[in-house]
């Protein structure tokens, strides 16, 4: 299955994608995770992306499109895209790449959540730098405070989850990314809107129920 998960920063895209790939077994292609790995490795791409990410802006389209279409080509068993496409140009270029490969996206899930909820989710997020597991200081606590349940690593706060950067990420979302939903609607693609203001588990129940319906249509 090939899926796209849309939604503002902190909507829960990464959290739900991890559960989707655990159940359905496709690749999780997160543009943010790939960029953070490039930064950690000190690559040219990572260094180029750094300033945009730290300020809450978007990395230029050409850089992202090359990076993500390259990752998609390697994911032969299907994938869920997380954080991409994030501009209409990225959506158009993804569509061209899919047409060229004779493939299509089977489902687009849009996590809908109010801005007022998002700030608390992002400033309270803690992540494991080793395995990428994501927690929240109030909503999704690890068993031992500050320590990853899976590998015992000390949890970290992302630099771009500081309040001043969060405000800019939300502004960027409304100015440049929200239009991606309209782009897909204009191409006749059905969007599955999910209320992502619910608890993590309730969002998962809603997402899985929609994906089961989608699977039965695809089969
Ligand atoms: P990226 O890493 O993609 O960040 P994002 O889209 O802002 O998304 P987040 O990872 O912050 O949030 P999420 O929706 O995954 O939420 P999560 O599940 O973690 O991108 C980072 C940067 O890279 C961008 O700012 C940009 O600079 C650059 N970039 C990336 N892709 C790009 C592209 N295509 N083009 C250009 N630039 C690009 O959850 C958040 C927290 O909330 C967690 O603590 C979680 O436990 C908690 N939580 C989740 N769901 C719930 C719930 N239902 N109830 C309560 N708490 C919840």
Image: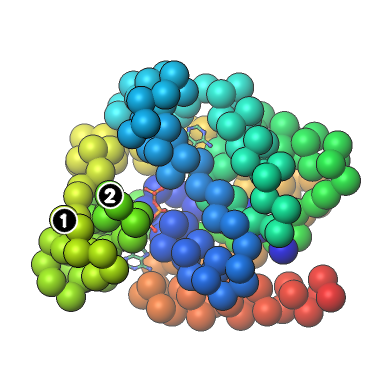
Comes first in the chain, label 2 or label 1: 2
Task: Measure the C-alpha gap from mark 2 to mark 1.
Answer: 8 Å
In the rendered image, residue 129, in percent from the top left (x then y), is placed at 27, 49
Residue 68 found in image quarter: top right
Q: Is 168 positioned to the left or the right of 91 in the image? A: left
Q: In the image, is residue 19 above or below residue 112?
A: below
Callout 2: SS: loop
Q: Examine the rendered structure and indicate whether residue 87 appears above or below residue 200.
A: above
| Residue 64 horizontal/vertical position (percent) | 56, 30
Q: What residue lies at 34% left-to-right and 56% top-to-bottom?
A: 131
For the residues bearing labels 2 and 1, Cβ distance under 8 angstroms: yes
In the displayed structure image, the side of residue 150 where residue 137 appears, left or right:
left
The residue indicated by pointer 1 is 154
* Label 2: how many Cα within 10 Å (few below 14, some 14–19, many 20+): some
Location of residue 31 in the rendering, given as x and y in whole percent from the top left corner: 50, 41
- Kindly tell me whether residue 148 is visible in this rendering: yes
Q: Residue at x 44, y 49 (%)?
A: 8
Compared across the picture, whether 201 is left or right of 104 comes to: left
Secondary structure of the residue carrying numbered label 1: loop
Quadrant showing the N terminus: bottom right
Query: Can you say whether 121 is above or below 159 in the image?
Result: below
| Front position in the image: 170 or 77 | 77
Labelled disc at residue 129: 2
Residue at the spot 56% in from the left edge and 75% down from the top edge: 23
Look at the numbered disc 2 and say if its residue's Cβ is closer than 8 Å to ligand 1.
no
Quarter-of-image position of residue 39 = top left
- Drawn side of residue 97 relative to residue 117, left or right: right
Residue 98 drawn at (x, y percent): 79, 42
Foreground pick, 190 / 41: 41
Q: Nearer the viewer, residue 89 or 79?
A: 79
Q: How is the image coloured?
A: rainbow
Looking at the rendered structure, the number of numbered marks drawn on it comes to: 2
């Amino acid at each position: 299955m090939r899926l796209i998960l849309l939604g503002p920063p902190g909507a829960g895209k990464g959290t739900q994608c991890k559960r989707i790939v655990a159940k359905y077994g496709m690749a999780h292609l997160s543009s943010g995770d790939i960029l953070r790995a490039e930064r950690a490795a000190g690559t040219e791409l990572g260094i180029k992306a750094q300033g945009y990410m730290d300020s809450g802006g978007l990395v230029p389209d050409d850089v992202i499109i090359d990076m993500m279409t390259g990752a998609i080509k390697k994911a032969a068993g299907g994938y869920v895209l997380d954080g991409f496409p994030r501009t209409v140009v990225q959506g158009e270029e993804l569509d061209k790449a899919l047409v060229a490969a004779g493939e299509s996206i089977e489902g687009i899930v849009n996590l809908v959540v109010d801005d007022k909820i998002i700030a608390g989710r992002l400033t309270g997020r803690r992540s494991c730098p080793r395995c990428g597991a994501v927690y929240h200081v109030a909503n999704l606590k690890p068993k031992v405070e500050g320590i990853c349940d899976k590998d015992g690593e000390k949890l970290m706060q992302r630099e771009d989850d500081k309040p001043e950067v969060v405000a800019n990420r939300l502004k960027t979302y409304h100015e440049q990314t929200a239009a991606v939903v309209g782009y897909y609607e204009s191409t006749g693609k059905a969007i599955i809107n999910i209320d992502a203001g619910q608890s993590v588990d309730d969002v998962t129940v809603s997402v899985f129920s929609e994906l089961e319906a989608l699977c039965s249509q695809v089969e």
